Amino acid sequence: MVYKELEDAKEVFHAKCRHCYTCIKSCQVEDPKPVEAALNIIFDKPANVDSLWRCVNCHTCSYACPENLDPRSLVYLARRRFPPPPKLQVFINNILSVGAVMELNPEIEEIRKACGAIKLKPAKDVVEALR
């Protein structure tokens, strides 16, 4: 089940979630778990909101849920309310400006030039697609 808004998901989870934490236990991400933060948000408990951004979108938490709920979607809905941590924002800004996680390094470009490799350029098509 996909939820359009966090409030919709909150209603469903309040009605159906058994609090068995199978979704949290199945998550392969190291602690703090993103799905745990999302559940804490909808159940009005303290949450490590930076961990929301650690989810790798594997869906394991949703497959594991015995009530067929979709905890993974909670993570993505919660992300709309909480900005990424500053370290992650640097990568996001790089992707939006040059089309890659890391900026082009002039020293590496000199080594590439000495080896006869082609000059790398910002991936403008990727940048435009992301805007």
Image: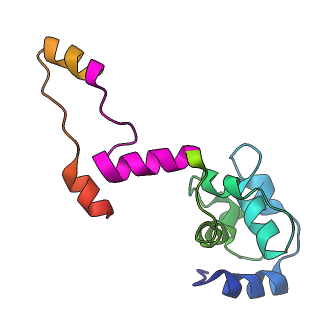
Q: Is residue 121 left or right of residue 8?
A: left
Tell which of 20 and 77 is nearer to you.
77
Is residue 38 magenta-colored? no
Q: Nearer the viewer, residue 120 or 17?
A: 120
Q: Is residue 100 magenta?
A: yes
**Where, quadrant-wise, is the C terminus in this rendering?**
bottom left
| Quadrant position of the N terminus in the picture | bottom right
Q: Quadrant of residue 64?
A: bottom right
| Residue that appears at 80% across and 54% down | 25
Q: How many marks?
A: 0
Image quarter of residue 71: bottom right
Left or right for 85, reference 89: right
Residue at 18% from the left image edge and 38% from the top image edge = 121
Assign the magenta stretch its main secondary structure. helix
Residue nearer the viewer, 20 or 95: 95
Residue 42 sits above or below residue 112 on the image: below
Residue occupying the point 66% across, 58% down? 52
Q: Position of residue 56 (x, y in %)?
A: 57, 52
Compared with residue 40, is residue 107 higher up or lower down, i.e. above or below? above
Quarter occupied by residue 40: bottom right
Which residues fall within the magenta stretch? 87-107
Q: Position of residue 5 (x, y in %)?
A: 61, 83
Image location (x, y in percent) of residue 28: 69, 47
